[in-house]
Amino acid sequence: MSNFSWKGEEKVMWHGMEVRRLSGPSMNADITADYEALAAAAPEQGLMELATRGEADRVVELLQEGECFVNECDPFGNTPLWLAAFADKPETVKALLGCRANPDLQNDFGRAPLHAACQRGDHAACARLLIEGNADLAMRNGLDQTPLELAKAQSRPGVAAVLNEAAHEGASRASWVSPMEERLASIDPLLTRDLPPLSAVMCPPPERPKPKS
């Protein structure tokens, strides 16, 4: 590898290979390591490589064996979930979320998996899965961008549409008022002033017994 380095870069070792990353706060350049190329060249079958290649079954198998940690990080602070979203591997994203991967862990550049879903491509399927996994829509990266703002800046219409839809649904749920709450408020606003939403404390209806065949 050449000794030339941009100002603010540092060299780190990843699976026996020397790669560069930005060491300063600048976010204008992408990570210089090509994750997919490195994963293909690496002889190891570790969690990071498997997540990047999209080998969902092997990812689950490795985690079940207890040989690794679902939220472990590479030298850039990326988790397996981040790498799967970055590489557009929705089945692996789903598998990692099923193994309780944290969808909000940010890397050294402040980028969460939702940012990764629109970092290099329009990975709408991965973004949707992350949102279903309760990823924070308001998480901000090192440039103070939310995933939606980054999707718009990167011209990722698919991810932007998914994020817009999720934000709208979230706002609708937060503003929903049950008919009983409306009735109580019409009688006396003090009855509902300090109470949590009724939907937050209601128990689900009991299941009906299935008819015998």
Image: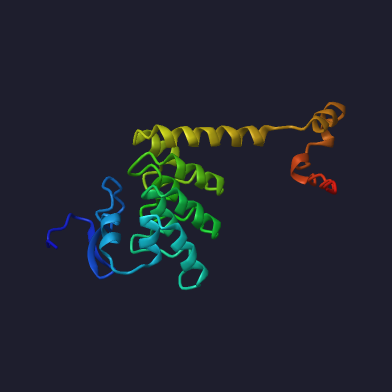
**How far across and how far down the image is residue 54, in percent?**
40, 55
**How far across and how far down the image is residue 212, in percent?**
85, 49
Compared to residue 12, the image places residue 141 above or below, namely above
140 sits to left or right of 17: right
Whether residue 108 is visible to the viewer of this picture, yes or no, is: no
184 sits to left or right of 63: right
Compared to residue 169, the image places residue 18 above or below, namely below
Q: Residue at x 35, y 44 (%)?
A: 119
**How far across and how far down the image is residue 133, in percent?**
55, 49
**How far across and how far down the image is residue 210, in percent?**
82, 47
Query: Seen from this angle, which residue lies furthest top?
Result: 186
Q: Residue at x 36, y 50 (%)?
A: 87
Compared to residue 91, the image places residue 57 above or below, namely below
User: Residue 32 appears in which quarter of the rendering?
Assistant: bottom left
50 sits to left or right of 166: left
180 sits to left or right of 84: right
Compared to residue 129, the image places residue 50 above or below, namely below
Q: Residue at x 22, y 58 (%)?
A: 9
Q: Residue at x 48, y 46 (%)?
A: 139
Query: Seen from this angle, which residue lies furthest right?
Result: 187
User: Residue 39 appears in which quarter of the rendering?
Assistant: bottom left
